Every structure is written in C-alpha cells, then in structure tokens.
Image (cartoon, helix red, strand yellow):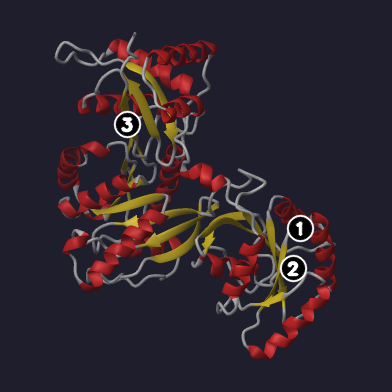
C-alpha cells in the first residue's frame, strides 16, 4: 500500500509507504483473546524450552534491556534554582544533555537520563529549582521536585558553596529528612582550594559530609559519586517510574559533503557547524539541542562516512568510529542524500548501517531545488533499484541551504519514532497472522508444509517478532510476512526483526 501527496508550498513530492497509522493503538477483541489462549494451549504438544515458555507467557525476551533499565536505582538531583543542578547532570553523563544557562528556572520539568559510574548504571533525574514558598508556575516546579524525591532511591542535594546555606536550603533539608531517602550533600562551585572553607560551613545543615565539587570543571565529582554508590541500592524501589532518556536523539548521517552541517545550522538557526565545499570538514560528532515542533530534539552532526571502517586510516578511521558511536547513541537517523548526483554505493551503505543498527530511519533528499524533471525521473528509478528494501522509510525532499521543507522532517521523525516504540498485542498479532497464512500458506517443500504455531512481539526499539513454527520458514516468506505486517500495522520508518523458532512435536511413548 502506497500513497503520496503534494506539499502545499511548492509541489515537492513526499513519499509515504505503509498502511495503518502507527500511532493508533490496536485493541484486541474477545475473539482474538480466545484465539491466543487456544494457540497457547496447542503449544503444549511441542517441545519448548524454559526460555520459550517465558517468552510465550510474558511476551518479552528474558532479561531484556528494558527490564534492566526499569530496575536501575533512581537518583534525583535537587536544589534551589541556579545552583548548578543541570551542570552536575551533564558532568555525570559526560555530555551536554541538560540545558544550562546562567538564568534561574531554565529547568522546569523532571527529566530522566541513563547514567553510569564505575560500572554501576542508574537513572539520573534532573529537576527544576526547589522554592519552598513558591507560587504560580514556580509552585508546580517545586511540586515536581518533591515528586522526584518520592520516586528516588537516593538524592544529590546541590548547594551553592559560594552563597552558603540559605533559609530555603534549610527548609529543603527538613523535607529531605522526612523523605527518609539517603542524601549526598554536594557543595557546588568549589572551583579551587580557596572556596573549600566555604564548603566546610555546610556541615551545619546536618546532612553529613559536604562534598566540595565543581560541576563546571569536574573537580571532586568522582569522590562524590563514589559516596553516592555506597548508599545506592542494587535495584530501584520504584520500577518503571521514568521514561528513558531526555530529548529524542537524532543522528545526521550521509557521505561527505551532502549537506549535513548545513542542515544542522539551518535547524539551529545559527552557524553552529563549519560548512565548506571541501568534503570532510566535520571530524567529530557535534551535538545541538534544537526545538522543533514545540519539543526539544538532540541533533548530532557526524563526519561523512567515506568507506568501510577497516579500509580507513588516520583521522578518517576515528571519524568513522565516532560516527558509529553517535548512531548507537541515537534513536533515529536522518540519512541525507545529494539528489544532484546519482545514488552511490556509499549512500546505500550508510542506509544499511542504520538498518543494521536497529535505529529508526528517515531519508532526506537534499538539494531538491537544484534538479529538473529529468533528474527527478532518473532519481525515482535509482530509488526503486537501490533502496527497494527500504521503501518503509519516510522520504522528505528538502533544501538544507535555503531551509525549504526542513520543517517536514518533524512529522517524519515523530512517525518513525512512534513506529520504533510500537507494540502489537499478542492476540491481535496471532489473529492477523492466522488470516494471512490462511490466504497465503507457506509453500510445500519436500512434501512438508511448515505451520505457524504462535507469534509474539518480544521487544520494541526496533520491533522484534518471534514466530514459533513447525518447520523452517523461507527467507522469501519471512519478507512476505514483514510486508504484510507493515501494511496492517504501519511501522513506518523502523526496521522490523523477525526470528523463527522451529519446534517439533513431543514424542509419544
């Protein structure tokens, strides 16, 4: 199923491939639930391992990343406005994730991040400034900080050592004591030994040793985190309390000189990245927090991927490795293609790298304003020939230099991420596959016809399906099932993984 429409502004065509809206939940009917129970009962005739049984019952692969993430201990970072909470968060994360400005009240919501220290992984929660006697929006910010403490296993309480303990700090201390949570007192902005005496004055708060830290420069942070690990439990008492990560992370990928840095500058509204016609200007991934469509996004500009990593040397080799690392940290990738030139093997390789990494994918065809009707015709033929296996990826035709249609990236990114996060109920999935197999059964091979016994979606990000079958399913039939899954449930912009577990009937004695 495929459709296309014309943009109202300039008639640039945007391809949309897929069926159902991936953002719409699919609720199973009673008949579908009954079918699921019947199929599970039928599995008793087949040899299933303990892992198989757990997968059938829970619908999730054992000890998956999501389970582990949900059980990590939670650390809340609290304190008055402008004491350096977000700077501390960035220092712990090792990257510029939380927004930092020399203005009180920049952070207003609770935002959770995945962090680790000395091999221990935990969820770090940044909060807005805690004003005890706040009113209006500041009151709601303080309430969010209080909720963060309730949903935490330990607290990093940040105090500005150069200011000392204020009345607000002392009232926050009383609230922290009532919570009963372990508290590590951070005396921030201790940039040199001259301020350490000010930090010592914070013993008066009665929270134990104040740890002198400079979140800006990293001084003393390691000792404070070691103290945090001493009081942090192995697993959280509030599993599943926080969604993963902060702003959605978008990697800009493509071969050299296709316009990645130009696009980032246009999105950021400033010359954030050096742009030059010489290919390879960008060496290091460059992060930029950009607000688009009313929400923040974390864009990462990367060095162009020139050739296979093992064939690169020197700076290009490390640039390729950093690009791969940026992709692994991203959730969705925008692959830029220069439409003024024929598609190259490098273009295809970059797209395949995204698919292999399991990230959501959006294709951005750049320099669209520079081509004529003849080039558009041949480009379509090239896409049909070289990207036939990626027809599910949203296509946006843009001009990074002029900014034309770059706003169209937002709905494409949102759709791809919604599909990437999508989960289909097991009963609905089996009912659908039952209809598909009844209409198009697997071909008979060597006198045998494999039968699909049961199916479940074992994971998301990307969607992973496990099919229990009585025999081997050929690769062509798996591709057929993937195509039908996309037609029925959408999955626009995300790769799909389908694995088959062949199980034989129990021997009768």
Q: Quadrant of residue 84?
A: bottom right
Q: Nearer the viewer, mark 2 or mark 3?
A: 3
Q: Earlier in the sequence, mark 1 or mark 3?
A: 1
Q: Name the residue beneath numbered marker 1.
A: 142
Question: x and y percent of residue 151 in the render?
Answer: 70, 50
Say which element carries label 2: loop
Residue 401 visible (yes or no)? no
Q: Which mark is residue 367?
A: none
Query: Vertical placement of 160 versus 472: above or below?
Result: below
Front-lying residue, 181 or 157: 181
Question: x and y percent of residue 164 in the render?
Answer: 78, 79
Q: Quadrant of residue 452?
A: top left
Question: x and y percent of residue 58 in the render?
Answer: 51, 29
Q: Name the residue beneath numbered marker 2.
A: 80
How many C-alpha atoms fall within 10 Å of the one at disc 3: few (<14), some, or many (≥20)?
A: few
Say which element carries label 1: helix
74 lies left or right of 488: right
Question: x and y percent of residue 488 in the render?
Answer: 38, 24
Whether tag 1 and tag 3 are in contact, CB under 8 A, the answer is: no
Q: Earlier in the sequence, mark 1 or mark 2?
A: 2
* Disc 1 to disc 2, C-alpha distance: 9 Å
Query: Vertical placement of 277 versus 5: above or below?
Result: below
Q: Name the residue beneath numbered marker 3.
A: 499
* Disc 2 to disc 3, C-alpha distance: 51 Å
Front-lying residue, 410 or 430: 430
């Amino acid at each position: 199923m495929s459709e296309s429409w014309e943009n109202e502004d300039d008639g640039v065509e945007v391809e949309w491939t897929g069926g159902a809206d991936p953002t719409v939940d699919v609720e199973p009917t009673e008949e579908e639930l009954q079918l699921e129970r019947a199929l599970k009962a039928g599995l008793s005739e087949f040899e299933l391992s303990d892992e198989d049984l757990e997968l059938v019952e829970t619908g999730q692969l054992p000890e998956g990343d999501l389970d582990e993430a949900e059980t990590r201990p939670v650390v809340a970072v609290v304190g008055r406005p402008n004491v350096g909470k977000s700077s501390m968060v960035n220092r712990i994360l090792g990257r510029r994730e939380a927004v930092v400005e020399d203005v009180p009240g920049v952070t207003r919501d609770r935002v959770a991040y995945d962090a680790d220290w000395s091999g221990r992984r935990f969820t770090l929660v940044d909060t807005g400034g805690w004003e005890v006697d706040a009113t209006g929006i500041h009151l709601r910010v303080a309430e969010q900080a209080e909720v963060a403490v309730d949903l935490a296993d330990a607290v990093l309480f940040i105090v500005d050592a150069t200011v000392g303990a204020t009345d607000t700090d002392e009232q926050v201390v009383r609230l922290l004591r009532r919570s009963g949570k372990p508290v590590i007192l951070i005396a921030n902005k201790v940039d040199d030994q001259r301020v350490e005496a000010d930090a010592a004055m914070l013993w008066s708060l009665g929270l134990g040793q104040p740890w002198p830290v400079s979140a800006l420069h990293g001084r003393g942070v390691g000792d404070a985190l070691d103290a945090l690990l001493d009081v942090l439990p192995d697993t959280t008492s509030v599993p599943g309390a926080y969604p993963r990560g902060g702003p959605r992370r978008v990697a800009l990928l493509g071969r050299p000189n296709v316009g990645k840095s130009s696009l980032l500058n246009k999105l950021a509204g400033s010359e954030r990245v050096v742009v030059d016609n010489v290919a390879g200007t960008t060496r290091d991934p460059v992060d930029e927090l950009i607000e688009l469509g009313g929400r923040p996004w974390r864009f990462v500009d990367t060095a162009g991927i020139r050739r296979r990593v093992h064939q690169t040397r020197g700076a290009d080799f490390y640039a390729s490795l950093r690009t791969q690392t940026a992709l692994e940290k991203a959730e969705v990738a925008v692959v830029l293609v220069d439409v003024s030139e024929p598609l190259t093997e490098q273009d295809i390789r970059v797209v395949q790298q995204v698919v292999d990494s399991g990230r959501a994918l959006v294709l951005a065809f750049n320099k669209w304003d520079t081509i004529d009707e003849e080039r558009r015709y041949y480009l379509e033929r090239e896409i049909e020939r070289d990207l036939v296996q990626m027809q599910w990826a949203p296509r946006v035709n843009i001009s990074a230099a002029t900014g034309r249609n770059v706003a169209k990236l937002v709905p494409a990114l949102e759709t791809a991420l919604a599909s990437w996060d999508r989960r289909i109920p097991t009963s609905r999935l089996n009912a659908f596959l039952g209809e598909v197999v009844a209409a198009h059964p697997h071909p008979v091979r060597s006198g045998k016809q494999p039968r699909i016994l049961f199916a479940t979606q074992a994971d998301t990000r990307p969607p992973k399906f496990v099919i229990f079958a009585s025999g081997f399913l050929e690769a062509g039939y798996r591709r057929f099932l993937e195509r039908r899954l996309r037609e029925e449930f959408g999955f626009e912009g995300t790769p799909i993984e389908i694995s088959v577990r062949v199980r034989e009937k129990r021997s009768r004695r």
